[in-house]
Amino acid sequence: MAKALLGYVGGSDPRLIAEMRRLQQRVQDLESELGRIQAENDALAAAASHDSLLESIDVPQAEPALT
């Protein structure tokens, strides 16, 4: 009866299994890419905090905007 409720009459569909494997591989690929991008972002943030371009600009007071 459980098989009838779930719709499994002749066993697992090979197309469904192939699609599930493809999606699992895609998730793994995206997770590894996310880890790489996060590491790159952390490195860039660390470099930006040490060599901040804005900190090296010496402006004693704000200049008026041109009208």
Image (cartoon, rainbow, N blue to C red):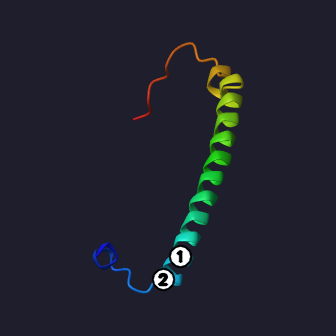
Q: How many marks?
A: 2
**For this view, does 24 lie left or right of residue 47?**
left
| Badge 1 density bin: few <14, some 14–19, many ≥20, Cα 10 Å | few
Quarter of the image containing the N terminus? Answer: bottom left
Name the quadrant containing residue 24: bottom right
Q: Position of residue 49 (x, y in %)?
A: 65, 25
| Badge 2 density bin: few <14, some 14–19, many ≥20, Cα 10 Å | few
Q: Position of residue 48 (x, y in %)?
A: 67, 30
Alpha-carbon span between mark 2 and mark 1: 6 Å
Q: Secondary structure at mark 1?
A: helix
- Residue tagged 2: 13
User: Residue at horizontal 64%, vertical 53%?
Assistant: 33
* In the image, farthest residue toward the top: 60
Q: Nearer the viewer, residue 22 or 8?
A: 8
Q: Amino acid at mark 2?
A: Asp
User: Residue at horizontal 64%, vertical 20%?
Assistant: 55
* In the image, farthest residue toward the front: 1
- Residue tagged 1: 17
Q: Secondary structure at mark 2?
A: loop
Q: Position of residue 30 (x, y in %)?
A: 59, 57
On residue 33, which mark appears?
none
Vertical position of residue 30 compared to residue 1: above or below: above
Q: Are marks 2 and 1 in contact (CB under 8 Å)?
A: yes
Q: Nearer the viewer, residue 43 or 13?
A: 13
Q: Position of residue 8 (x, y in %)?
A: 38, 80
Quarter of the image containing the C terminus? Answer: top left
User: Residue at horizontal 68%, vertical 28%?
Assistant: 46
Q: Nearer the viewer, residue 51 or 47?
A: 47
Vertical position of residue 44 compared to residue 4: above or below: above
Q: Amino acid at mark 1?
A: Ile
User: Residue at horizontal 44%, vertical 30%?
Assistant: 65
